[in-house]
Every structure is written in C-alpha cells, then in structure tokens.
Image: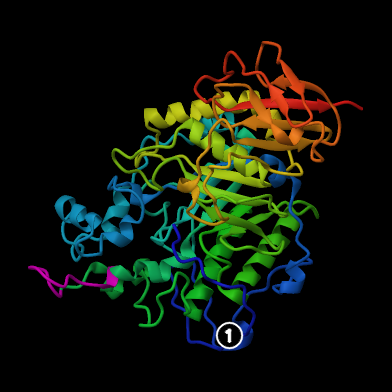
Amino acid sequence: MTHNRRHFFKTGALTALGMAMGRMAGGSIPSFTSAPALLPDPGAGPFLPTVESLSGYRYPDWFRDAKFGIWSHWGPQAVPRHGDWYARRMYIEGDDDYKHHLEHYGHPSKFGYKDIIPLWKAQRWEPDQLMALYKKAGAKYFVSMGSHHDNFFLWNSRLHKWNAVNYGPRRDVVGTWQKAARKAGLRFGVSEHLGASFTWFQTSHGADKQGPMKGISYDGANPVYQDLYHGKAAADDHDWLSKNAEWQREWLFCIMELIDNYHPDLLYSDSGFPFGEYGRNMLAHFYNGDLSKNNGTLDAVYTCKQSSDGYWVEDLERGVKDGINPSPWQTDTSIGDWYYRTGQPYKTATDIIRMLVDIVSKNGNLLINVVQTPEGDLEPDVLRIVDDIGKWIAINGEGIYGSRPWKIYGEQPDSAPAIKSGNFNENKVRYDARDIRFTTKGDTRYAFCLGAPETDIRIAAMGSSRNSAGKAIDSVALLGGAEKTHWRQRHDALVIARPSKMPVAQVPVTGFRITFKK
C-alpha cells in the first residue's frame, strides 16, 4: 500500500519519447515516436481528458447508498505468509522478509520473486461461496485486486505475460470474481497498484553489500526479466509515482485494457491522481465507456488518494475524516495485514462496525480487505468476524444503507483524542459508549451508540432546546430490540434508558430509530 501520497493533478504536454517495448506475442503496447501519438483516443462520449470536462462528473446513487464494500487484496505475495510488500522487501538486505527468503527459498539472485509467483495455486479458492458470505455480511460492492506493486496481473492480459492465466492459479482471477459478484447481485470493482510498481520494485535491481554474496546482482537486474521487474530507474526517479513518461504511458495502456476487458463499476488507484495527462485520458476513457455500457447513465466510480473537487471519490487508506465531507469519500482498510501473515492479529467485528458507523455519519463508505490465505480460503477467526459483521448489519442496516449525514455527524466525549482527517489515523481513534453517530433517511433519524452503555444514553443534540433537533420527538425504538424503549426528551438532551440486552451480543454498538412529530 502507499506511503508517499504527494502527487498532484497537473496539466502540461509530454515530449516525444522512444519506442515502447512489446510485452509478449499476441499483444503489445503500441509504440510512439511523436507527441500526437502519445495518448489513445478516450472514446466517444462527453468526457475529454481535461480538468474542465471531468468537472462534469456526478457521484452515482449506487455508491452513495452502498456504504460497505469488501475487497480481496490477494495475490502471489501471500505465498510466503509474511504479510504486505514481500516482493519488495525480500530484496532489502537485512530485512525480516529478506532473512525469511534466504531461509526458505534461497538467495534472491537465484530464487527471486519470479519463482514465488508459480507457487501461488489458489487451490482452495471458492469465489461463489466467498461472495455469498460477503453478501450475507452486508457488502454491497466487491473489489478484486487487479495488480499490486509486484507487477503481476490478476486479469487475462494480452499486454503482459506475467498474469494469473499464464502463471500460478492459471485462472482469470478478476473475471472469476466479477462473475461471482454479478451472480450475487453486488457491484464490482478492481484495484490497480501498478502506477507505483515502477519505483517500488527497484530493490530487485540491487545486490548484497556484505557477506558471501556481496556484489552479486539480484534477479531483477537480469534483462531477461525486466518485463516483470521493470528496467532500472533513473537515479532521481524514486517518488511513489515515476516521472518516466514511457512508464506512465505503459501504465495507461495496461489500465485501459483492464477497463475495456471488465468494465468495472469502480476503479481504485493506490496513489494520488496518477500521471497527469495520462491519468486524465484514462479517467475520460473510463467514464465514457461506462456511459456507453449503461445506455447514457454514468455509474462509474474512480477512487484515488487525493481530494478531487468532485472529479472522483477521495480514498483514505486506514484513515477517517474528522467531520462531514461535502462529497462522498471512502476509507480502505484491512481486517489484518494486507496479505496473509502467519499469526497476524485481526480487527474485531466491533472495531469494524464502529469504523463503518463513524465513516457513514461523515458521508463516507468503508471498503475492507478480508484476508485470504495463499490457498484462497479464510481462517476460522476471519470467518467469525465476517459472520458477526453480518449479524449486526442485518439488524441495523436500515440506518446505514441509503442514509445521508445529518446536520452534525455525532457527539463524543471531551476526552476523545483530536483526530485530523488523513491516511493512517485509524489507530488513533478511540470509541466508547459516549460516542454517538447520526444518520438520516427522509424524516427519520438514526443514532448509534458506539459502546456498551453502563448508564442511560444521553444525546445532547436531540434536546428540545437544541437547534439541531428541530422538532419534538415522537418515538424512539432500539433497532433489533424486542423490548419497549424508554426515553424522554429533556430541554438539554434526549435520554434513552440503557437497554437490558444488546441485540447483537458480539457487537456492542446499538442503533436507535428516531421519528418526530408532524
């Protein structure tokens, strides 16, 4: 996942460059020798690759209503059972992944990442069963990994031989997930992390600096394998997104192939908006193609790690907002590590539901990675977590799906730590029974208490003298509760008697439906 997010939405023409290298027989990235051939046609439709044209984008209702998605952040890097970024870190001398690789596979000059890839067999992967499980858990959209920074494509590519049809499981992973999602009635998305791979994978071009293998190049330096590891980057090309225009153009043709092969409802880039003019061309192509697919209705959602002024959906990695965002947004996070790691700790269902409610109250969606084993199934702990999420959403979903933010997102105790909107802040957030979050659907309000209360629940914003309440309360009902809810609206707060029993014992987050007098 990304660590350097500083990439800006830029304009400007690119100069002519040399010939592009073909990837394999049966398909290649077209070459170009002059500026007019730099960019492909974005396709027929109203969107052009300009800031002005892309400003005409409007967020589709399906995404605003969905609120909750599940992601399969999965691929060959799961094989060593060592977590995220293995393909990069196995080439960093002294790193734990490097040491693991030496012990289990040998030196990366002889046994490199190219040799890990065939070991990924996915022999216990049952996509229809998993999709049914995710639907039961409450997911409204599903996202497949397309390609991680390891430059291995999980789709059936004619441009790149290092793909899941030619190696490893020898299946079109993206296409198979898509078929399962559509069968289950879920929207389908794909994540692309390819843009960062050009600089991310440069460690494979190194060599040990000490020891018996000192100076012996790793296999990434072998020109035979540069279609996997990329070529050697210029000395000053080390940011998250490469400045090499030829690589940028290679990215464009590969992502356009992904779009054209699968026409996803959602496309995610693991970066800020990528590659200026090339990125705008991709985005116009994506939106125009979706309009064509849907007979003039634009359902496409593009997410990246950058605010957009309405051109796409801003995504925060493992982070949350500090207030209601005017535009829809998304948090992406994981139940555990991004890839399978032996003995890894997992978020509880309560952790995930608290995040979901907080994010939804602020006009966002939650996309969470459910960690799969290298073989493709889920550990028992993960199965229990997903099942508990589903039990809670089955009762409380009416206050989540299709909801919109209220005038304020909620209330929290004075002792709550101050959190600024951003990536990687989820571990700083603390929730308890004094945290209240609001959503609204029409004239109905929903209030969620994010912890198990030991006393009556007090909601200051719903007091009769508070401007935020607006009207006198007519009824308060505990979602999923069989008992009558006792409450009173005082001038300074709505006070709800502590429920005698939590509707979902495994997840002590309680939801209340509040209606108002006409």
**Is residue 123 on the magenta stretch?**
no
Identify which residue is drawn at 37% across, 82% down: 234
323 or 390, which is in the foreground?
323
Question: Residue 299: horizontal and vertical position, in percent?
Answer: 72, 51
169 or 348, which is in the foreground?
348
Query: With respect to residue 105, does 510 lie above or below?
Result: above
Helix, strand or loop at label 1? It is loop
Q: Quadrant of residue 503?
A: top right
Question: Residue 477: horizontal and vertical position, in percent?
Answer: 73, 20
In the drawing, does residue 56 fall left or right of residue 69?
Answer: right
Query: With respect to residue 274, does 264 lie above or below?
Result: above
In the drawing, does residue 124 fall left or right of residue 157?
Answer: left
The quadrant the C terminus occupies is top right
Q: Which residues are magenta?
A: 204-215
Q: Identify the residue under disc 1.
A: 14
410 or 208, which is in the foreground?
410
In the drawing, does residue 341 fall left or right of residue 274?
Answer: left
Question: Residue 367: horizontal and vertical position, in percent?
Answer: 56, 45
Identify which residue is drawn at 66% across, 11% down: 482
Point out the residue furthest to the left here: 212
